[in-house]
Amino acid sequence: MNRHLLAFACGTALAFAAASCSLTTAQGFTECITDVECGSRAVCSHGYCVPLPARCEKKEGSFNTFDRIPLAALLPLTDSPDGGAEDASERAGLDAMRLAVGEVNAQQGLAGRLFALYTCDTGRSSDEIVAQTKWMISQLQVPAIITSGSSQTIAAYRAASDAPTFFMSATSTAVDLVALYNENQAHLLWRTSPPDSQQAKVISTLLRTDPTYTQAATPRRIGIIYEDGSYGHGLTEALATDLTNNGKDVRTIQYDAAALDPNAVLNELQSFAPNVTVLVSFPPAVKDIVRAAKQRQSLTHASGHRWAFADAAKDPAIVDAYTAPEIDGALGTAPAMGVGPAFRDFADRYRTRFHVDPALYGYTAQSYDAMYLVMLTTAWGKYKGLLNGANLAEGMSRVSAVGQAQVNVGATGWQTATAALSGGASIDLKGASGELDYSSAASMDTGAPTALYEVWSVHADGGIKTERNVSPP
Amino acid sequence: MRRPALLCLLAVLAALPALGANAKATALAKDAEKLYKDNKYKEAAELLQQAFDADPVPKFLYNMARAYDQAGELSWAMEAYRKYVGLPSDETDPELTKKANLAMDRIRTLLAKDEADKKMQEAEKSRLEGETKEAKARAEDEAKKAKKQKEAFEAKEKAQRDEANKRISTRRLITYGTAGAAVVGLGMGLGFGLASGSAKNSFITATTVQDKQKAESATRTLAAVADVGLVIGLAGAVATAVLWPKAQEAETAVSVSLAPAPGGGFAVLGGRF
């Protein structure tokens, strides 16, 4: 009997010891309060440490406060998700955003709540940006996402169709985006650059009137090589239409960025024998195409062929010893940087922090403005009681109110601007990239500001120089 | 007393030839005399009867009476004496007649006494028989009562035993029940505890908030079930530990009890070993 009882007691003790694991497993579900506790490769969300997707990181801002306001920037920092070449222009734009976040957090953020910027490299992949967008929304509950490039912006916007997320882009200029802007009554998609329909007119005018292209003879045949995608399609279509309407013979040649064969493109171009070729392309493709064209006599600078560039090509990286003779003096266009005190302050702070002139790259000021606009709209969201995409998007209608207090983007105007917006008032924000006028009828229909364009030129010494600012005709 | 009687008889017998009795009777008388001397009184009396029958000499009758008297056959002796005394006085010896009368008185007294003794014995016998019968009836009655009591006691014992067995069975059932609950509870605790641990591992390795929430919920649910099982198991184990010895103790208990039985008490030794 005692033996049985002893065996039973031992069994009970063993079973208890094994079963008592349950007493400890039901604890420890709160893994974190802030991101810092999750290490460099994970974020803290709902008390859980959630690993960041590949190519994403905690880039700028406060990651050690429990009430940080998370914002995401999904940018094609490289041209391939498999580790492509870095896009210096995108990197410059990201730095402008980091500068903005740093300045605002130095001002104690939004009434003490600091901002945290999470970034991802999309590698120009639609699949990547879709996955990253979904992750940022579902895991981090970001109320706003900043994107770059029209195709990427469209893909991200579509991926967020189930969640009202505020999208802002500094570089997306495709005409297709207008439709997306108007697709949702909340107008969730906004930009800090004017639409490409305006740039197309600026480029067309430039090709027809600027001595760089008319000095020898008025160009009759104009080729347009463009990257497949919303940006390339939209701008090329608008440009081709305008040029055709102005009596030019136009040949458009499309290529796939992921499988660019410069010779195939140039074979078609060479058969067209253009006087001028506009590259609606990004820097890596620009370099490859120009390099290959140099091998073809009819497409060389010496033979009279000239290159022109759209905004995406504005990057000193396109100039090297081999390409410089071919593109020296060539012109390009891009939404203009500001010329007022807001831009000067931005440029000074940018140079101080990153030791680079922001004017060397396109869209740095627009990126800076985009980041500020997103953060400012959180003040309106605070006024509305909830920092969600719809409230932030609604805040865009409060930042460009004519007749209200003018506030320059930047650290000095932050407190004034957020105080007004948090109190339900409107402001008239002046951006580093320009007026940031969203109040005109055109802007209200597109989600993009009316703005000046700059004409920039390539110099053989590796520099990019802003020649002048022009208004779209 | 017999010696004088013998002498008398011998004298009588010696005088017989002189009296002219026939030879057969005389021979019979002599034989009777011889038997008489040998203390064979009854045989002597029978020979004298034959002698008297052969030759009705009164003395043969008297002597026959004496022989019967000596043989203890008092009735026969009394009859012979009475016949002798009833003979005509001229045929009898007055002395013998007197002796016969005396003998008859004595015998009569003895017979009366015998009768009285016999009656008394019969009465005593009758009394003893009655008492025996009564005692037997009483004994039978007591036996019946004892039997009834025994049966009642056995029934009571059986009822008590049944009750005890029932209690034991119930206690054992409860013990088995608590042991079963302990096993099931601890098994449940163990199973769900392990499942909870697995869910916790899923929680740790989950890469999304939603997966972590699911894993947390699953872990909490499984852990709660495991904890309930654990509590049940522990309670069952404690109850079993308390009840088990009692259940075993009752099973091996020895009980001794006393119960009445005919002629005295009896002991009942029961229980399981």
Image: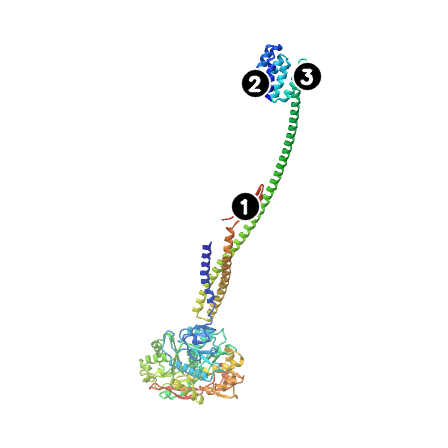
The Cα–Cα distance between marks 1 and 3, rounded to whole angstroms, is: 80 Å
Q: Is residue A196 left or right of residue A462?
A: right
Q: Amino acid at mark 2?
A: Lys
Q: Are marks 3 and 2 in contact (CB under 8 Å)?
A: no
- Visible in this render: residue B21? no
Q: Is residue B249 left or right of residue A59?
A: right
Dividing the picture into quadrants, the one containing residue B58 is top right
- For label 1, the crowd category at 10 Å Cα-Cα, with few meaning under 14, some 14 to 19 and many 20 or more, is few
Q: Nearer the viewer, mark 3 or mark 2?
A: 2
Task: Give whichever of A414, B4 is nearer the camera.
Answer: B4
Label 2, on which residue?
B37
Q: Nearer the viewer, mark 1 or mark 3?
A: 3
Task: Give whichever of B187, B249 is nearer the camera.
Answer: B249
Which structural element holds mark 1? Answer: strand
Q: Are marks 1 and 3 in contact (CB under 8 Å)?
A: no
Which structural element holds mark 2? Answer: helix
Disc 2: host chain: B
Disc 3: host chain: B
The Cα–Cα distance between marks 1 and 2, rounded to whole angstroms, is: 72 Å
Q: Earlier in the sequence, mark 1 or mark 2?
A: 2
Q: Nearer the viewer, mark 1 or mark 2?
A: 2
- For label 2, the crowd category at 10 Å Cα-Cα, with few meaning under 14, some 14 to 19 and many 20 or more, is few
Q: Which residue is at a point 60% across and 42% down the rendered structure image?
A: B146
Label 3, on which residue?
B86
Q: Which residue is at a point 53% across and 79% down the rendered structure image?
A: A385
The Cα–Cα distance between marks 3 and 2, rounded to whole angstroms, is: 27 Å
Q: Earlier in the sequence, mark 3 or mark 2?
A: 2
Disc 1: host chain: B
- Visible in this render: residue A53? yes
Q: Amino acid at mark 1?
A: Val
Q: Is residue B48 left or right of residue A391?
A: right
